[in-house]
Image (cartoon, coloured by chain):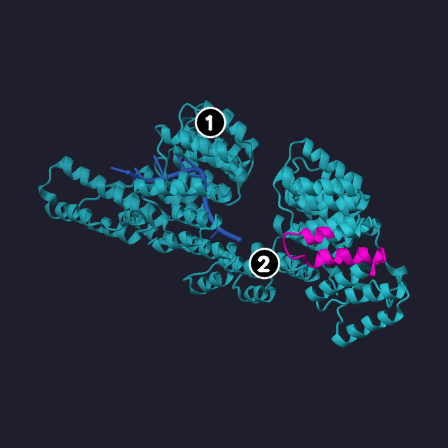
Amino acid sequence: MLQKRAATFVHHHPSRSYSSIFKQNFSNSSNLEPHKTSKFLIYCNTQIAINGRDGNLKEAESIFNRMPHKSTVSWTAMLTAYSQNGQIAKARNLFDEIPDRTTASYNAMITAYVKNGSDVEEAYELFARMPVRNGVSYATMITGFVRRGMLDKAEEFYADIPDEWRDPVCSNALISGYLKLGRLEEAVRVFKDMVETDLVSWSSMVDGYCKKGRVLEARGLFDMMPERNVITWTAMIDGYMKVGCFENGFGLFSSMRRGVVKVNSNTLTVMFEACGNFCRYREGVQIHGLVSRMGFNFDIFLGNSIITMYFRIGFVDEANKIFWMMNKKDLVSWNSLISGYVQNDEIEEAYRLFQIMPVKDLVSWTTMIAGFSNKGNIEKSVQLFRMMPEKDDFSWTAIISGFVNNELYEEAFRWFIGMLQKEIRPNQLTLSSVLSASAGLATLNQGAQVHALVLKMGMEFDLYIQSSLVSMYSKCGYVAEAYWIFTNISAPNIVSFNSMITGFAQNGFGEEALNLFRRMKNEGREPNCITFLGVLSACTHVGLVQEGLEYFKSMKSSYGIQPEPDHYASMIDLLGRAGLLDEAIDMIRSMPFKPHAGVWGALLGASRNHLHLDFAKLAAQHLIEWEPDNASPYVILSNLYSIVGKKMDADQVRMTKKLKGVRKSPGCSWITVKDKVHLFLAGEQSHMDLNKIRFTLSTISKEMKGLSRHREDWLSFDQSSDIS
DNA sequence: ATAGGGTTAG
């Protein structure tokens, strides 16, 4: 099956049948009848265009050079082929040699300038001196201005178009300019003002609404349109897929296949991407089979999307097989391959491929950096990061979130400041990662400054950032602020609810957490495993043992969620705090997996609080087995012995600890002091002057006001508060 | 058959 599809690639290359047609016509061209010559001419022009589009520039050139008779179309097609392959100088030389230029030749050259380096000045110069302009000429200039970020110029230019040229293509160019900048309302305005619309106008609007997630309105236009083509269908299907409506998207794909408009490789690319994202391997494999049976002439985009789909559903071998069968691969193919291995936890294989790939770009490096840090190998991530020839916001975000995921929050902050010093603009991901770092440090100072930065950059309505802010304020103990952020989220998702429920629970607001959980269920939202961690912890804080047990049971029975070790740890905590130590032990025994340190830690804490020596000993033993370097179990156990008056045993535990050389400090917390973060030991030997601790909101508002206003907004982040 | 709109990897 794959063999058959591989054969379709030959289409890009000079096939035997093509060569023979060519040779025959070339040698006998003078004897051919005029209409036959014209057919051959059209054939060659088409081949130049196809080869140009597919990146086979050599082949296009070869056909062009060997053509006995060229028309202006041949010259223009060749010019476009150069332009599409980034050969602007060759395009320009060819343009100068065209014997009789048409408007299309000029338009092609203007497009070449606009698409290669956005040289709108050169484009305009040519535009100004072309003898006859049409709508496409104006449209291309508008596109050029938009690409260079000169929207006002584009608008001005559009307004100045003479009435007789008010072709829909001009309005379409402005509409797509607005849509590229995400300015839907302005696009709608132009669309509504159009006297005459065409398929492109409608399709662009459908896509515009889809890109904003407004699929209902998009569908309204889609149904209202006088006619639809493959681009319209594909945009609509993709729109459904991107808002998470797989069934609608797949349904539309099915009706498309039953209709007259033919599916093309972009449609299939969208489908494979969706099947991968929704883990719908059945549909993915089915469509793959369809593609093979059709002998589809699949391009690199399509091949890449199939690879990605197979990796997402965990079919590593299938993905790998397809990669090596593709006889044309680009950087995206390689990046998809290494990213696929990273996703499937095969970091070593990913790294091996990374090292042998012919060309690496930012994405390749960033993929490996993120991959290593997710595996806990942050040293390797840092090493790769330093080796990178250039870095962008994504690479910096990868290394910063790498530190965050490995709980190295202060390092994350230090690198974030490094990023700002390099004047790399943070994106939503960077900021939400740094907010997690602030949450991890539980230092409001840092977190509030990042919040200020978020406001300055106008990212306060980003859903991910909002959830990170909720977590950050909660973890710092500012539940009111967290709740205020939460209430301002226009469309909270499961992550937002989880952040707030957990936030309430962690701060002892058990009732509030449970109320929010009920509200969430009433709104018809499905809780997930994180939700239950918050809910169980809320029950613990309020001492709702019975409810906690019921929620724990309902996880599996009502929602099909298998409790994880952390859920058990939370239950042990709940039972233990209520003094139900025997029940806690029973639950530990009933666990379907080996109890981890969290479980034993919860039991140890409960045993100490209820002065239960046997269970404390048991828990401490297991804890030491899990974390031999952690001093906590020794300290807690010896304290417990002291409390119950067993001085000898207490001394013995302390002795064992000393003999084993366990020195890792017990529970530390980070407290902000005058813009600096100091290690504050929970124990008795603290050297801290508590009077110096400033931890108030007034400090934060001062920080926010103190952010300077004259430099570029995002650069005004206060870097003096580096962590020392 | 040439000029304007949609799709893949971090």
The residue at which mark 2 appears reads as A374
Q: Give the range drawn in magenta.
A: A586-613
**Towards the viewer: A524 or A308:** A524
Quadrant assignment for the C terminus of chain A? bottom right
What shade does chain A have? Answer: cyan
**Towards the viewer: A250 or A676:** A250
Chain drawn in blue: B
The residue at the point 82 percent across, 73 percent down is: A652
Chain bearing mark 2 = A
Chain bearing mark 1 = A
Above or below for A601 versus A287: below
Above or below for A401 versus A256: below
Q: Distance between the Cα atoms at labels 1 and 2?
A: 43 Å
Residue A336 screen position, x and y as percent: 46, 53
The residue at the point 41 percent across, 38 percent down is: A267
Above or below for A462 versus A636: above
The residue at the point 89 percent across, 63 percent down is: A644
Labels 1, 2: front one: 2
The residue at which mark 1 appears reads as A222
